Image: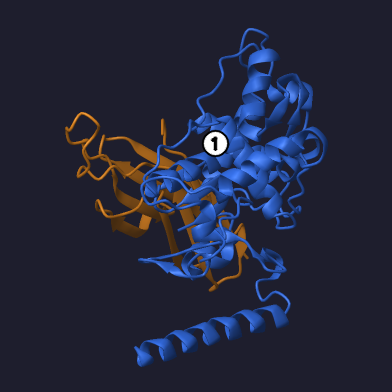
């Protein structure tokens, strides 16, 4: 018993020492760290980070290329492409990835990039909405968010967004599933610790859509939410559901200041 | 993934004798043939089983790929630039298709 306590104290001291030295150097992770906030990049394996560092090696860029192709492809009954209204994405979509999810008045609730793309497709292009996790949707979301690369995440949680932000926050701290875990138990209390063979990150959303090596493909933030929810053995919510958009808003606020990395590469 | 899209990265020019790095990436699902679908049946194998690179119609690099190779495989290798010429890359799919791409290299 006595020995156990000693070991416990030693480990706690080591963790604290590690933490304070990181704080002293004022961000050993460069742009991927803002104060105590650390992008998922800093938790990824060195080999994984190397893939993200080189745009050519990043397989998510294949999805992005496809998104760029779709940008100027006419579709729907209105026979319009994204480019017909929004012109050059490099100008018109700059900053979008950093400030979304944003409050959308016609719906009276916040909307994320994926849902906004489909809203545009249905209303303006009179085209069929894309499936949430389809190659088209992931490509276009990556392409749109990529235009805000390295811009600090900065979502508006004031005004009409506040109640939705509060709901997202409540979701984050609410225990769920058979394992009775909230998001915070892993990503707030235990980030940096191992969960079996995996390193827990802070669960930041700034890199999504992300090429996940485990998925062997690009996936959305909501796919990741669903994975997390299943892992604590709760029933996941739907893609683009209100619960997840609210959570997305809260997460973006938690990670405010971190650079948009989309499309990133993760383990 | 409907079709495979190859990407290559070759320096446009090099000095004689220089060792240059060539990088290639192709979008491909690389289905191993070991997985089962929702219906319980095995999803048939479909991978790229061979990759070759030739310089002025002479093979300079070739490799056989097996089911353990990841989806969207990246292949990079080095070559010594001796003369100007054309690099041809080919990826051979299990279904008989060949995806190809080429690049020109100028050696000064």
- Report the residue that reaches farthest toward the left: B41
Chain whose colour in the figure is blue: A
Dot 1 lies on which element? Answer: helix
Give the quarter of the image for residue B36.
Answer: top left
Identify which residue is drawn at 66% across, 11% down.
A79
Give the quarter of the image for residue B27.
Answer: top left
Chain whose colour in the figure is orange: B
* Colouring rule applied to residues: by chain
Left or right position of B19 against A33: left
Q: Position of residue B31 (x, y in %)?
A: 28, 42
- Image quarter where the N terminus of chain A lies is bottom left
- Report the residue that reaches farthest toward the front: A1
Q: Position of residue A204 (x, y in %)?
A: 60, 55
Q: Nearer the viewer, residue B100 or A75?
A: A75
Identify which residue is drawn at 61% across, 12% down.
A76
Q: Position of residue A173 (x, y in %)?
A: 57, 50
Q: Position of residue A167 (x, y in %)?
A: 64, 39
Residue A35 seen: yes
Q: Chain of mark 1?
A: A
Q: Which residue is mark 1?
A: A138
């Amino acid at each position: 018993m006595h020995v156990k306590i000693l070991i416990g104290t030693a480990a706690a001291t080591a963790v604290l020492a590690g933490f304070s030295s990181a704080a002293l150097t004022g961000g050993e992770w460069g742009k991927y760290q803002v104060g105590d906030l650390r992008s998922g990049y800093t938790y990824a394996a060195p080999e994984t980070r190397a893939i993200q560092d080189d745009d050519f090696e990043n397989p998510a860029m294949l999805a992005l290329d496809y998104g760029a192709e779709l940008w100027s492809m006419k579709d729907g009954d209105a026979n319009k492409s994204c480019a017909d209204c929004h012109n050059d994405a490099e100008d018109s979509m700059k900053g979008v990835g950093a400030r979304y999810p944003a409050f959308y008045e016609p719906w009276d609730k916040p909307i994320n990039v994926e849902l906004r793309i489909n809203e545009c497709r249905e209303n303006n292009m009179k085209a069929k909405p894309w499936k949430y996790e389809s190659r088209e949707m992931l490509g276009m979301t990556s392409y749109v968010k990529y235009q805000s690369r390295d811009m600090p995440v900065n979502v508006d949680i004031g005004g009409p967004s506040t109640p939705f932000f509060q709901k997202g926050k409540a979701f984050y701290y609410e225990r769920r599933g058979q394992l009775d875990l909230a998001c915070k138990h892993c990503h707030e209390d235990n980030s940096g610790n191992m969960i079996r063979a995996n390193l827990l990150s802070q669960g930041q959303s700034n890199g999504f859509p992300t090429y996940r090596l485990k998925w062997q493909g690009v996936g959305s933030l909501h796919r990741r939410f669903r994975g997390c929810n299943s892992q604590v053995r709760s029933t996941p919510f739907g893609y683009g559901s209100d619960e997840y958009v609210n959570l997305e808003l809260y997460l973006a606020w938690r990670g405010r200041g971190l650079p948009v990395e989309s499309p990133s590469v993760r383990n | 993934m409907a079709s495979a899209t190859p990407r290559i990265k070759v320096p446009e020019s090099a000095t004689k004798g220089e060792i240059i790095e060539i990088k290639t990436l192709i979008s491909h699902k690389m289905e191993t043939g070991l997985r089962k679908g929702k219906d319980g049946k095995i999803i048939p194998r479909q991978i790229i089983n061979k990759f070759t690179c030739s310089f002025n119609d002479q093979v300079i690099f070739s490799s056989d790929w097996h089911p353990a190779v990841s989806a969207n495989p990246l292949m990079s290798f080095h070559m010594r630039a001796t003369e100007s010429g054309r690099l041809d890359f080919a990826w051979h799919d299990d279904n008989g298709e060949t995806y190809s791409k080429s690049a020109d290299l100028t050696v000064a």
